[in-house]
Each structure stands twice: as C-alpha cells, then as structure tokens.
C-alpha cells in the first residue's frame, strides 16, 4: 500500500514539529571534532547519535549519501540502518544524493531510494534536472506511485550554480525559473502541499524576480555555517515562506556528540524558524 503523498506528510510534520531539516553529514572533519575515527565505526557512532538525538523531534533528517558511500558497502549498510531508524522514530528522510540521468538509469536511481521495497527507501530524494527536466520523469512517476517526493536543484547556494541556473533561455526565462515552472505544474491542484519541491538557497538574497510559489516545499540550505539566519527567510522567500524547509547541518552537528546539546541546538533553530515564518 502506498503512503500518503509526501507533501501531505511533510506539511503535517512541519506543523507539528516545526519546519526544520537537519543534515546527517559525517564528513571527516566533523568526525574528528566529535573525537571519532574516520572509519566505519566512527561513521556508525555518528549517524546513530544524530538519529537518537533528532529523529523524534525534527520534521526532516537529510543524510548526505556521499559521506556514507565513501566507505563502500559497509558505509551504505550504515546508511540503510540510519534511514530505517530515523523513519521508525517519526522523522521524514530526504536522501541527499542529487541523482540525475536519463531513461533506465534514472529509473534505477529512483528505485534505489523511492521504491517501497528498497533497503534505502526514503521519503524524498534530491535530484538534478540539468540533463533536462523531462529526464526526471521516471523518478516523478515512481514518487507518485509510492507516496514519496523529490527536491529538484533550482537555485542553489553555491556560487558556481549561477552560471547554469541564471542563464537566460531563448524565451527570456532563466533556467532556474524554468525548473520552478515545471515543479509548479507537477504540484497543480495538490493540497495542502504538493510532493515535488525545489532546492533554493537562503544565502541568495533577493529572489523577488522568481516565482517561488510552486505549490510544493522549498528545501533551503544556508542557515548557520553558511551565514544566513532564520530572520532572513521572509525576505528571501516572500509569499512562499510557509512552504520553506530550512536545512541546518553544521550549525546543529557541531554541538555533538552530546545528545542533549544536539537536541537543544535543534530545538532552538526550530523555534527561531517558526517565529520568523509566523511573523512574516
């Protein structure tokens, strides 16, 4: 049986737990900061601690698959456990894998993360549309079938992204705006929120020239270590701010490995974000 649509489940989680996504990013420097070795044992200790601290209170956990994949099959096994335990504790899991390909290969990537029988089954997956938005169709269809969702790279926070995403097409619309328009079409008529979201960086400043009201969620990196604050959200996202899921990784994770300190940091960010969104 399929789950409720991802957008429905995400809206409920955001309303109940606050609109916060915490990354699970076990890069080598953070493992060292936690006093852990850069090996599979350190990886497992790190991911279990984050799940224990966060999964019963934040709306979304977002593991970065690359930091698990670098350890090979044993790292992927740790990722499988983290996903399963996070979902069992009530958090929605967005797999940050940024997959993008064509045809049967895109379908296989989608099955890896969005099929209900996959060991890595997640609530949503980050994907790249830069082989053409239409190449994502296998992932869109599988997400609809399984009640899962996608977050499509649209206006990312890295400086290099502008050379592609702000490029102007022959019709006068930027590439990023085209991606947003495709997502709005996917979400048309969905209530209370569609399942197909965009990745839009908080650090980009004034985005008033873009229509961010796509009827779906906006995964927003940039708060914390990258310099943005919850107070920046209304100015960046305007009328779409209620659909923003701000992602905070190092700003929370640097407080580990103490579970209480991690929870306190996450609770503080969630409350500051809720206050900023409510005041908008």
Image (cartoon, rainbow, N blue to C red):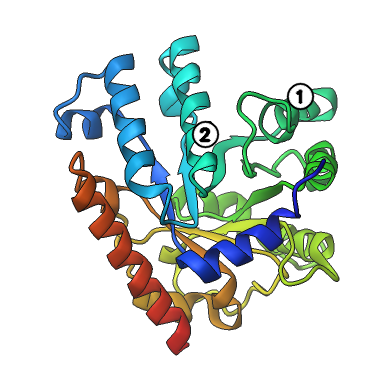
Extreme top residue here? 73
Residue drawn at the location 44% of the way across and 75% of the way down: 233
Find residue 69 and name its label. none
Q: Nearer the viewer, mark 1 or mark 2?
A: 2
- Identified at 31% across, 58% down, the residue is 266
Q: Secondary structure beneath disc 2?
A: helix
Q: Nearer the viewer, residue 122 or 240?
A: 122
Compute the Cα span from label 1 to label 2: 19 Å
115 left or right, relative to 240: right
Q: Secondary structure at mark 1?
A: helix
Is the residue 84 above or below the residue 155 in the image? above
User: Is 30 on the left-hand or right-hand side of 203?
Assistant: left
Q: Which residue is mark 1?
A: 108
Q: Position of residue 255 (x, y in %)?
A: 19, 48
58 versus 122 height, above or below: below
Task: List the residue tagged with mark 2.
Answer: 83
The answer to which of 171 and 9 lies nearer the viewer is 9
Question: First in sequence: mark 1 or mark 2?
Answer: 2
Q: Which residue sits at x=71%, y=68%?
A: 193
Closer to us: 50 or 182 = 50
- Image x and y of residue 280, in percent: 47, 87
Residue 88 in sight in this render: yes
Q: How many marks?
A: 2
Mark 2 residue crowding within 10 angstroms, few (<14) / some (14–19) / many (20+):
many
Classify 10 Å Cα crowding around label 1: few (below 14), some (14-19), many (20 and above).
some
Say whether residue 184 is left or right of residue 262: right
The percent coordinates of residue 7 (x first, y second) are 69, 60
- Give the percent coordinates (x, y) of residue 232: 38, 76
Above or below, 236 against 84 in this view is below
Q: Nearer the viewer, residue 27 or 87?
A: 87
Quarter location, residue 215: bottom right
Whether residue 167 can be seen here: no
């Amino acid at each position: 049986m399929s789950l409720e649509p991802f957008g429905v489940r995400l809206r409920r989680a955001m309303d109940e737990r606050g609109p916060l996504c915490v990354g699970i990013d076990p890069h080598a420097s953070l493992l060292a900061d936690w006093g852990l070795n850069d090996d599979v044992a350190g990886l497992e200790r790190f991911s279990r601690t984050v799940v224990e601290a966060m999964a019963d209170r934040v709306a979304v956990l977002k593991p970065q698959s690359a930091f698990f994949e670098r350890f090979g099959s044993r790292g992927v096994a740790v990722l499988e456990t983290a996903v399963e335990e996070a979902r069992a504790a009530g958090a929605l899991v967005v797999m940050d894998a940024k997959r993008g390909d064509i045809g049967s290969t895109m379908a296989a990537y989608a099955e890896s993360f969005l099929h209900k029988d996959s060991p890595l089954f997640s609530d949503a997956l980050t994907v790249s549309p830069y082989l053409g938005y239409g190449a994502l169709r296998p992932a869109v269809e599988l997400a609809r079938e399984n009640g899962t969702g996608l977050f499509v790279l649209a206006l990312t926070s890295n400086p290099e992204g502008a050379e592609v995403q702000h490029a102007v097409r022959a019709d006068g619309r930027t590439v990023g705006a085209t991606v947003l328009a495709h997502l709005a079409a996917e979400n048309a008529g969905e209530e209370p929120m569609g399942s197909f979201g965009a990745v839009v960086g908080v650090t980009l400043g004034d985005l008033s020239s873009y229509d961010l009201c796509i009827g779906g969620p906006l995964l927003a990196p940039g708060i914390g270590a990258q310099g943005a604050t919850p107070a920046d959200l209304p100015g960046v996202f305007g009328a779409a701010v209620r659909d923003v899921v701000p992602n905070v990784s190092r700003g929370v994770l640097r407080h580990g490995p103490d579970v209480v300190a991690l929870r306190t940091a996450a609770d503080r960010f969630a409350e500051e974000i809720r206050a900023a969104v409510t005041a908008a």
